[in-house]
Image (spheres, grey):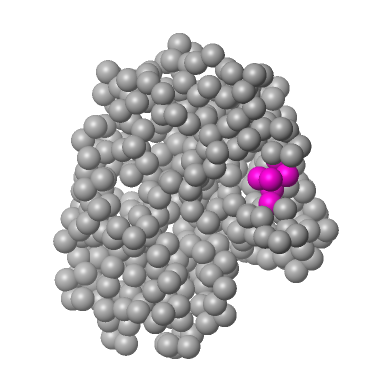
């Protein structure tokens, strides 16, 4: 699962915004020499010993919250460490967030954050251009002791020197069983007449086009330009014919519940947490896409040690189990399934949190792209989502 791709939640903005942001990010580029940094020299004095605070940017709906007698993992971290956490859910899209911080990081200026959480492919790129600080392994022993084997050694950070998975998850499809009969495949999303105009797909290119490639018989982990053209043409046709209502982020959940959308490409945890028994998430017949999001400490972070305490804390099995019980994403921590017996017995065998080998056997990843391929494919996709 280590090198797989993840959603981009363009919350409330739709495809046009994604297209503009994506193209702007690509124009800046990651390989420009004047934007590459040396994290060993582009760093700030760590003020953690005197300033008990920590600033993190994460994705929406991704952490448990205090509720009555329930004390969240964040509140417990603050109590245990004395560190005040400034937690903001402002990572709505990988490309969009890149646009927020690229000028600062690319010029060795502060992003005003001690940590942010990004999907594998974007995390890899930021590490490659030297925008991310190396973690002190002695301060994150739980990470190295407890990370699950499938996430332990991605090709872009083989020793987890710079990154730590926050959560992982599956992308499949969802439908409103009160409004429509079972939807079994991605191909049905693109072709079924009773779904016309009431289908939403994700703005994450690697998720959506991964399914499109599978639907035309290609392997997302190893495909040709001819495969790509066949898959992207199927997307153009679905959009042109009015089959697809919108390309969105996680606001598809509200549309599914309201019946504005009957079926959607969907992230597993979103549906599990929707609070609507009419919404059904399934792995489509083509298989599932799988991804992970990663905690990263950017250059010039001023509370790096506090950030490392955060990582180490969330790699305690009991803490990881509590977080996973809340958001129902794949837990990256060994021992969490055993710990879940005390946290929530009903979740111990939840495959969305602890997937079986059978589930993993139908999972797919999107192949690594060079810069030219990335520019070409992102432009093709944004032309569809923004048209």
The answer to which image quadrant residue 252 occupies is bottom left
Q: Position of residue 384 (x, y in %)?
A: 21, 60
* Residue closer to the observer: 156 or 23: 23
Looking at the picture, how far across and down is residue 316, in whole percent?
74, 42
Q: Residue at x 25, y 53 (%)?
A: 17
Magenta span: helix, strand or loop, mainly?
helix
Residue 158 in sight in this render: no
* Left or right of residue 347: residue 188: left
Q: Is residue 75 magenta?
A: yes
Q: Is residue 296 above or below residue 238?
A: above
**What count of labels does the image hold?**
0
Q: Which residues are magenta?
A: 72-77
- Residue at horizontal 60 percent and vertical 38 percent from the top: 85
Q: Quadrant of the C terminus?
A: bottom left
- Residue 345 locus on image (x, y percent): 79, 65
Q: Who's the residue at 44% across and 29% down the image?
A: 112
Position of residue 235 in the picture relative to residue 264 (left or right): left
Q: Is residue 80 left or right of residue 376?
A: right
Residue 94: x, y in percent? 38, 45
């Amino acid at each position: 699962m280590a090198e797989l791709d993840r959603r981009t939640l363009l919350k409330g903005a739709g495809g046009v915004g994604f297209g503009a942001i994506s193209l702007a990010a690509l124009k800046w580029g990651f390989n420009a020499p004047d934007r590459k940094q040396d994290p060993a020299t582009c760093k700030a004095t760590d003020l953690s010993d005197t300033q008990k605070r920590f600033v993190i940017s994460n994705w929406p709906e991704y952490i448990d919250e205090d509720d009555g007698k329930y004390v969240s993992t964040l509140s417990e971290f603050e109590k245990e460490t004395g560190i005040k956490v400034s937690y903001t859910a402002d990572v709505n899209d990988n490309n969009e967030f890149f646009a927020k911080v690229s000028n600062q990081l690319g010029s060795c200026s502060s992003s005003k954050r001690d940590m942010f959480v990004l999907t594998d492919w974007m995390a890899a790129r930021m590490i490659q251009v030297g925008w991310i600080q190396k973690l002190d392994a002695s301060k994150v022993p739980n990470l190295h002791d407890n990370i699950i084997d499938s996430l332990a050694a991605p090709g872009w950070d083989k020793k987890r020197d710079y990154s730590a998975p926050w959560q992982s998850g599956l992308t499949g499809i969802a439908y409103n069983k009160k409004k429509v009969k079972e939807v079994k495949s991605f191909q049905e999303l693109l072709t079924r007449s009773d779904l016309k105009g009431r289908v939403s797909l994700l703005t994450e290119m690697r998720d959506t086009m991964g399914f499109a490639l599978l639907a035309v018989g290609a392997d997302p982990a190893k495909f040709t330009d001819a495969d790509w053209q066949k898959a992207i043409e199927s997307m153009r046709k679905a959009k042109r014919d009015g089959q697809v209502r919108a390309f969105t982020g996680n606001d598809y959940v509200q549309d599914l519940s309201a019946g504005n959308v009957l079926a959607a490409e969907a992230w597993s945890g979103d549906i599990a947490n929707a609070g609507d028994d009419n919404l059904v998430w399934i792995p489509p017949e083509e298989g599932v896409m799988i991804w992970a999001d990663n905690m990263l400490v950017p250059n010039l972070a001023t509370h790096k040690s506090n950030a490392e305490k955060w990582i180490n804390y969330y790699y305690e099995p009991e803490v990881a189990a509590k977080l996973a019980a809340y958001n129902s994403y794949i837990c990256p921590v060994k021992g969490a399934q055993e710990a879940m017996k005390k946290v929530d017995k009903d979740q111990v065998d939840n495959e969305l949190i602890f997937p079986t080998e059978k589930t993993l056997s139908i999972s797919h990843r999107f192949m690594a792209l060079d810069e030219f391929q990335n520019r070409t494919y992102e432009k093709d996709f944004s032309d569809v989502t923004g048209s």
